[in-house]
Image (tube, rainbow, N blue to C red):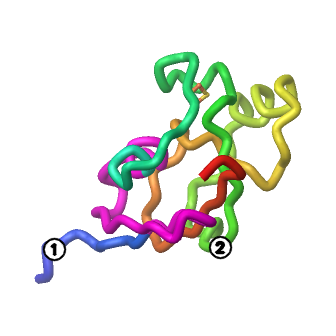
């Protein structure tokens, strides 16, 4: 049996950076920090501030569906529905994301 965990490549646009992580190893927010890119957070990754919203460009189907709470926080903070809260999702497949400030 192959007990190696699946690897995922997370690509960051337009910075043209990428990191490789183990599936489910860390949140998208932590993967962003590992890539050496800044990401806003005002709630300590508690899923409350919506500052960490990133646009999902490709691979979003591998992310767990939005929870009701994430949907509510995004709506309250007028976050575009193409974005996910990076502190709330743990990538389990290849993913491409974008932030205007990279
Ligand atoms: S860091 Fe606050 S919602 Fe993600």
Q: Residue at x 71, y 55 (%)?
A: 55
Point out the residue furthest to the top here.
43
Residue 45 against residue 2 in the figure, above or below? above
Q: Residue at x 47, y 49 (%)?
A: 28
* x and y percentages locating residue 12 in the rendered image: 54, 63
Dot 2 lies on which element? strand
Q: Mark 1 or mark 2: which comes first in sequence? A: 1
In the figure, residue 72 lies in which quadrant?
Answer: top right
How crowded is the residue under tag 2: few (<14 C-alpha within 10 Å), some, or many (20+)? some
Residue 44 against residue 97 in the figure, above or below? above
* x and y percentages locating residue 88 in the rendered image: 54, 38
Front one among 21 and 98? 98
Q: Is residue 101 left or right of residue 73?
A: left
Determine the quadrant in which ligand 1 lies: top right
In the figure, residue 3 lies in which quadrant?
Answer: bottom left
* x and y percentages locating residue 68 in the rendered image: 74, 34
Front one among 82 and 66? 82
Can you identify the residue that label 2 sits on? Answer: 58
Q: Which residues are magenta?
A: 10-31
**In which quadrant of the rendered image does the N terminus lie?**
bottom left
Let me know if residue 70 is in the magenta part: no
Q: Residue at x 58, y 69 (%)?
A: 96
Can you identify the residue that label 1 sits on? Answer: 4
* x and y percentages locating residue 33 in the rendered image: 39, 44
Q: Is residue 74 left or right of residue 45?
A: right
C-alpha separation, residue under disc 1 versus residue under disc 2: 24 Å
Q: Residue at x 70, y 28 (%)?
A: 69
């Amino acid at each position: 049996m192959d007990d190696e965990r699946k690897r995922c490549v997370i690509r960051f646009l337009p910075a043209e950076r990428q990191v490789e992580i183990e599936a489910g190893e860390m949140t998208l927010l932590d993967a962003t920090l590992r890539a050496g890119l800044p990401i806003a957070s005002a709630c300590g990754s508690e899923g409350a501030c919506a500052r960490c919203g990133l646009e999902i460009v490709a691979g979003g189907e591998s992310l767990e569906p939005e929870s009701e709470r994430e949907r509510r926080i995004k709506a309250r903070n007028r976050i575009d529905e193409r974005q996910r809260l990076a502190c709330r999702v743990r990538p389990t497949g290849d993913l491409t994301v974008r932030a205007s400030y990279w």
